[in-house]
Image (tube, rainbow, N blue to C red):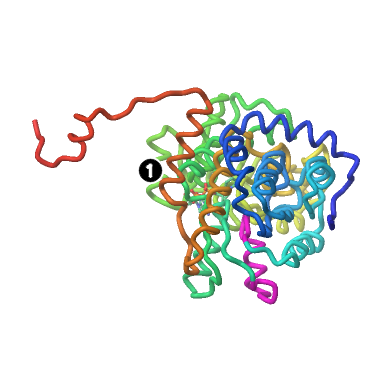
Amino acid sequence: MDYAIRDIRLADKGRERVDWAFQHMQVLKILRDRYEKNKPFKGLRIGCCLHITTETANLMVNIKKAGAQVYLCASNPLSTQDDVAAYLVKKEKISVFGKHGDSRKSYYENIKNVMKRKPHLIVDDGCDLISSFHRDDSLAGNIIGATEETTTGVIRLRSLAKNGLLKFPVIAVNDANTKHFFDNKYGTGQSTIDGILRSTNILVAGMTAVVSGYGWCGRGIAARFRGMGANVIITEVDSLRALEAVMDGYRVMPVSEAAETGDVFITSTGNTSVLTINEMKKMKSGAILGNAGHFNVEIDLAGLRSASRKRKVRECLDEYTFRNGKKIYVLGEGRLVNLACAEGHPSSVMDMSFANQFLALKHLKENRDMTPEVYRVPEDIDKKIAELKLAGMGIRIDKLTAEQKKYVNSWDMGT
Ligand code: NAI
C-alpha cells in the first residue's frame, strides 16, 4: 500500500479524534450500518481529493466499508491533519497522500498519485483532481463520474461543461440544500471565527469586522461576528445580495471605503483580488486579514509582500510591516482560515455534506447512462438526508393532514 504522510506514529491520536467526530455524524452512521452489508461499491476504486480532516476520515471509512478501494489526497496544503492521515493509513489501510504544509509541487504529486490508481469514481473539493484528469486524460479511461463539494469547484465545472469539455458526469454536491444551507452558512460561519480566535485571541466585541461577499458563507460569518458583538460591514458586487445585507441590518459600502474603518477583514467571495494593496494602504495599522474562500487568491499577498517586511508572530499569523511602520496581519497565509487555522467545520454539519457525497456516488454507480453534465443531487436524496438528520437529533415534526394536502394542491379553494 502506497502513501505519503507526515508521521505514521500519530495514528492513535488521529483515531481518538476521528471517533469523537463520528459521534456527531448520525446520518453517516446510519448509512455505514446500512451499506456495510450489501457493499454497493464492491469492485470500485474511488479517488478522493478532500481536506484531510476527522470528518473526511469518517466518509473514507464509510466508502471503504461499502466495498470500495479508497485513495485520498489533500485538497489544500494547509488543511491536512497529520494525525488523521496516519490513522487512515495505519488503522484503515487507506492510501493517503498529504502532509500539512505540502509545497505546491508535492500537492500536485499527491493528486497524481490518486490519478495513477485509475479511479472509477471521484470525489473532489475545488475541482483540482477533476481538472487534472481533463489536462491529462491518459488515466481517465475508467471514470464513471464524479462529485464536487464546493461552490468554487462547481463554478469551474460549469465552465468546463459550457465549453463542451466536460468528459464525465459530475454531481454538484455543494448545490444540495442539505449542503450549502448548513455547511457553507453555519459551518463556515462558526469555524471562521474559531480560526481567527485560535490565531489571535482578539476580543470580537466592539470591533469592526468587514466581510466581503454576502453569499452562503458570508451570511454565516457576518451573523457569527454580529452575535459576538462586532460592528459588521458587508462589501458585495451583486445588488440583490447587497440589498439583502442592508435589510439584514448590516452596513454596506465599497471595499475601498470599508478598508479605512475595519479592524478585521474576511473574504468569502470565491473571486480573485478582493483585498488588493490599494485597500491595504488605506487600512489602519494592526488590521487583520483572512480568507474563507476556496483558493488563496482573494487577498493580494504578492502585492503585500513587495511593499513590506514579513515575520511570523504566532501560529498561523504573519505580520507585514510597511516602510512607514504600519503593520498588517494575515491569517493562515491567505488560505481557508477555518481549515488552516482551526479544524474546519464541526462534524455535525459535515455529516450532511458527506451523506450527500456518499449517496451521490451511489447514484452515479447505479445510473451509468448519465451524460457529461453538471447535475444536482436528486431531490429525494436531499430530502432523505434532512429527515435522517432531524431523526438523529431526536426532533420530530408535523405531517400534512389529508385536508391540508388537498388544500395545498388545489387551485379553486379561495376564502
Ligand atoms: P456564493 O456564490 O453563495 O457567494 C459568493 C458571494 O461573493 C456572491 O454574493 C458574490 O456576489 C460575492 N462576490 C463576488 N465577487 C466579489 C467581490 N469582488 N467583492 C465582494 N463580493 C463579491 O458562494 P459561497 O457558497 O458563499 O462560497 C464562497 C467561497 O467559499 C467559495 O470559494 C467556496 O468554494 C468557499 N467555501 C469555503 C468553505 C470553507 O470551509 N471555508 C465552505 C464552503 C464554501
Q: Nearer the viewer, residue 347 or 200?
A: 347
Residue at image mark 1: 243
Give the amino acid at mark 1.
Leu
Q: Is residue 116 above or below residue 52?
A: below
Which is more toward the observer, 316 or 46? 46
Does residue 134 belong to the magenta stretch?
Answer: yes
The furthest residue to the front: 38
Residue stretch in magenta: 121-141
Q: Residue at x 62, y 54 (%)?
A: 41
Residue 238 x %, y %: 42, 52
Query: With 5 as the anchor, is 291 left or right in this view?
Result: left
Q: Is residue 331 visible?
A: no
The residue that appears at 47% across and 44% down in the rendered structure is: 253
Decide if residue 341 is on the left or right side of residue 40.
right
Which quarter of the figure is the C terminus placed in?
Answer: top left
Left or right: residue 285 compared with residue 348: right
**Residue displayed at 70% across by 28% down:** 202
Occupied quadrant, residue 405: top left
Asked whether residue 400 is in view, the answer is yes
Q: Is residue 248 magenta?
A: no
Residue 44, position in %: x, y?
66, 59
SS at badge 1: helix
Numbered marks: total: 1
